[in-house]
Amino acid sequence: MNNTLIIGQYVPGDSIVHRLDPRTKITIIFFFVFIVFFANNVAGYSLLTVFALTCMLTSKVPIRFIIKGLTPVWFLIVFTFILHLFVTKEGTVILDFWIFEFYSGGVVQGFAISIRFFLLILVTSLLTLTTTPIEITDAIEDMLHPLKRFKFPVHELALMMSISLRFIPTLMQETDKISKAQASRGVDFRTGPIRERIKAIVPLLVPLFVSAFKRAEELAMAMEARGYQGGEGRSKLRELKIEKRDIFVLILFILVVAGLILARMYG
Amino acid sequence: MDITFENVTYIYQQNTPFAHKAIDDLSFQIKSGSYVAIIGHTGSGKSTLIQHLNGLAIPTEGKVSIGSYHLSKEEKPKDMKELRSKVGVVFQYPEHQLFEETVAKDIAFGPQNFGVSEAEIQNRINEITSAVGLDESLLERSPFDLSGGQMRRVAIAGVLAVKPDVLVLDEPTAGLDPRGQKEIMDMFYKLHQDQGLTTILVTHSMEDALKYADHVLILNKGTKYMEGSPEEVFSQKEALQRVQLDVPEIVQFLDEFQERFGTSIPFKKQSVKELAEAIQQQIKGAEST
Ligand SMILES: Nc1ncnc2c1ncn2[C@@H]1O[C@H](COP(=O)(O)OP(=O)(O)O)[C@@H](O)[C@H]1O
Ligand SMILES: [Mg+2]
């Protein structure tokens, strides 16, 4: 547990990607998710790949670290590729092996889908790698603001999100601490029959729940004591601000989208 | 069991941008049967150090030996559970580890895991509840209904019920009232003497270190800053203050005494009574000349 990492855990830095307004980043990723499915030829895919790789390089997040974060999904990417290889029956037969026939369409399809997968995961993990959870929450609150008119509890939602995010590391520390304490009392979380291992979770979960409830109560009390009463009329500690660099990056992104449309029309 | 640290380094989250060296090339020895106090500023690596004593942490570099058990990158004990039954650890705020329905069941949890027979467990529960100062009427209560001090005692009883040879205490009295602190520390000391335990106490209290320990280890930023008998270590006031540590009250007193009266009484772990006598002699001596 000490040596594992959450995928996409924030890596501090001050690259331009880090300093972009979180709303800019979220907007770009939102549209990126759509246009990835819009690409249908080599030119389109290359454009998107270049864009994603440029973002990755300018973020200055160590590449080793990004690859590590992608490890769990490599399997999925390779699996999709192989699946397509076997089931797609389009184009010409390029290889005839025993009872299998591999079609050129399968290779192309498999490749395209894997690239899409890869790009999506790369770009979304770049968001969480370069943006603190608090920034993301602030951005979401700000962007959902129009929904307030329809009585959608935007502020409460954002508050819930930021409280949960705030307590994830605490909860992980607590888990680490209690599992060490119980391991010292002879609990074995790693080996033994499944039944025993499931039973071993009880001494871990009970204290975790107890302390989580206690924390929630204390937090509610502390908020009330400091006069918290919801979002109405409450000013912000961190103001989001669109800078020149945001405009610049947005324009760049629009150009990529335009390039993609051109590639699709004339490619 | 003798305990040896040989050039131990421990790095949290190695190979990530969050890598953090909590222990840095640390070597020392603890003789079987001794009572060692480990002192250091918050974050100096005390809690990380003690996790090496029962294999919760494996050194990133170097080697730890506890009796015949060796822990290093290359070599881990085959039976970690056996090691853990011999090294009992009372963590900081141990009451957070309580989970059973009743106090008795929680105390029995450790011994059960280590395969102690039910009859023997019953004996131990009775013996230990009185040792830690818990009333027997509490045994069938839920540990979550108890006061903070009582919960702490239950958690400590749960560790003692395993009957370890080495007892590791990580700030065991933090957050208790002064009277409870003294009771618990005295209880540990009695156990240490009666059962010939090797005791390792992490503490912020110089008084406790002076009173109970026969060896003191001062940590600073994951390295050994000072080591020696309490007399040796605590007479070096300047060196301790450099790492934001105080000296025991009695040393502070002797220091100020010297400043006021210009004569010094060497610090030899005197009791208050011995000290009073020494001062009386000094003053008498001064009057007669
Ligand atoms: N699980 C962990 N992950 C990363 N760093 C940690 C972890 N636990 C402790 N540390 C760091 O290691 C250093 C030593 O911590 P610790 O051993 O708890 O010190 P102490 O008990 O002396 O206060 C601190 O800087 C702390 O932030
Ligand atoms: Mg500590």
Image (tube, coloured by chain):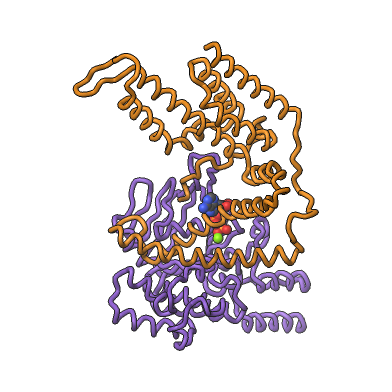
Chain colours: A orange, B purple
| Nearer to us in this view, B109 or A54 | A54
Give above or below for B286 relative to B214: below
Where B32 falls versus A112 (above or below)? below
Q: Is residue B276 visible?
A: yes
**What residue appears at the point 43 percent right and 84 percent down from the top-left corner?**
B140
Total marks placed? 0
Q: Percent from the top left, x then y, of residue B100?
A: 43, 73
Residue A8: percent from the left, percent from the top? Answer: 53, 40
Q: Which quadrant contains ligand 1? A: bottom right
Residue in the foreground of this view, choosing between B270 and A160: A160
Question: In front: B65, or A217?
Answer: A217
Q: Residue at x 59, y 27 (%)?
A: A55
Residue A90, above or below A232? above
Q: Is residue A166 left or right of residue B111?
A: right
Answer left or right for A69 relative to B249: left
Residue B249 figure quarter: bottom right
Q: Residue furthest front?
A: A150
List the single residue furthest toward the top: A266
Q: Position of residue B259 (x, y in %)?
A: 76, 69
Q: Which residue is pictured at 29% across the width and 20% down the height?
A: A102
How far across and down, in percent of the image, does residue B87 sit?
A: 39, 66
Can residue B229 be seen?
Answer: no
Q: Nearer the viewer, residue A239 or B18?
A: A239
The quadrant holding residue A73 is top left
Q: Residue furthest left?
A: A98
